[in-house]
Amino acid sequence: MQKVLITGGAGFIGSNLAEHHLARESQVTVFDNLSRPGGGARKNMEYLTARYKDNPNFEFVLGDVKNLDQLTEVMPGIDVVFHVAGQTAVTTSIDDPIEDFDTNARGTFNVLEAARRAGSDPIIFFTSTNKVYGDLTRQPVTLVEKETRWDFGDKGFSEGVSEDYPLDFEAPYGCSKGAGDAYCLEYARTFGLRTVVFRMSAIYGTGQHPTEDQAWVGWFIRRSMEKSPVTIYGDGKQVRDILFITDLLNAFDQALESIESTKGQAFNIGGGRRNSSSILELLQLLREKLGIQPSNVDFGPWRLADQKVYISNTAKAKKTFNWEPRVSQEEGITRLYEWMREGKR
């Protein structure tokens, strides 16, 4: 039986991973401090505990990745670690850079150290971010303003940003996640740990409890459902490629199956150009497809480190472990809307 440890296992991605691997009859340890702003982690943990209270393969450990001793205690015997715990908002990293560093940089270092000492040679997946590429100025990129979105003007970026693009950590959040990203790759080189880094774009889906600072797709869906006002920071034409949670779970599965090819490498994971959207385009889709819209839309100043365009080029993932997105943004947004409307958590 495979033994799985999920740091941040009560969060959006973590709780989906927990259910996914419990369905596969893995032994799953959820490790979380339940501190996520907005209370989403506690809601997810209540759901998991109620659903799997009689499942002997499910264990919850109240712990913090900032505590190396706690990680060292739970790590022995683990086969696969999904390190998805983290501080997730650029704005929060600016307000409290010390906490951001301790959680994302030191927390990731602690996971690696605990794994190195465990003796069971666990495979480690780390969820990094597109913010490690900064504002895309290290290598000249022409941007074109269109009616509803910004876009790349260079043919070389027609399919998005690849892993070859120079790293340029921006904002405390980009630095802290970038440090964890770099340490994961270095621990593979230096100590032979089987680490895999996913540099992710906007992940969305069921089990997500959005706030204004994080999970923008879900946030605009919720505010539109409630007919509440929203504020767009910037011009609303900023673009991200969005990826539904089941496609991310498939990426983990396929990268794990191909670990001899994926270990020690970083991969851009996102929805790609076909699943790219600006905020204005998302609001249009919600209005035309689902018949929902906010009561009012205001505009505020651009946020620091908010790229005008980021689209993941996922060709490396396709080539290395035969992964590509399957869920269209229209299908994924509809599924998230229906889940939020049913209010299951």
Image (cartoon, grey):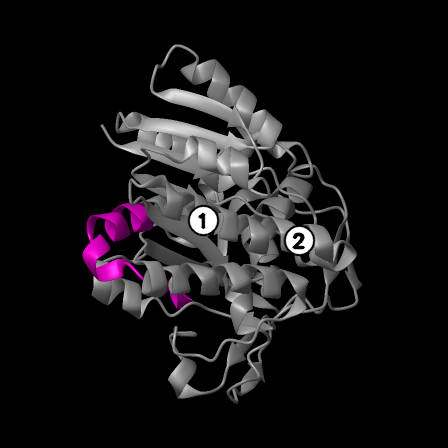
Q: Quadrant of residue 38?
A: top right
Magenta stretch: residue 268 in it?
yes
Identify whether 68 is placed above or below 43.
below
Identify whether 105 is placed above or below 84.
below
Residue 207 visible in the shown view:
no
Amino acid identity at mark 2? Asp
Look at 74% across and 60% down and name the residue there. Answer: 94
Observer-side mark, 2 or 1, equals 1
**Is residue 260 found left or right of 215 in the rendered image?**
left
Q: Which quadrant of the figure contains the C terminus?
A: top right
Range of magenta residues: 250-275
Q: Nearer the viewer, residue 45 or 209?
A: 45
User: What distance separates the C-alpha of mark 2 from that of mark 1?
Assistant: 19 Å
Query: Which circle's residue, 2 or 1, is located before the other in the chain?
Result: 2
Q: Which residue is mark 2?
A: 100
Residue 207: x %, y % from top left? 51, 34
Residue lying furthest top? 54
Look at 42% across and 59% down and name the residue there. Answer: 184
Residue 208: x %, y % from top left? 54, 38
Residue 47: x %, y % from top left? 51, 21
Identify whether 157 is placed above or below 53.
below
Q: Nearer the viewer, residue 223 or 324?
A: 324
For the residues bearing labels 2 and 1, Cβ distance under 8 angstroms: no
Residue 272: x %, y % from top left? 40, 64
In the rendered structure, find residue 218 and report the number of the disc placed on it: none
Neighbours of disc 1 within 10 Å: few (<14), some (14-19), many (20+): some
Q: Which residue is mark 1?
A: 113
Look at 71% across and 47% down and name the residue there. Answer: 294
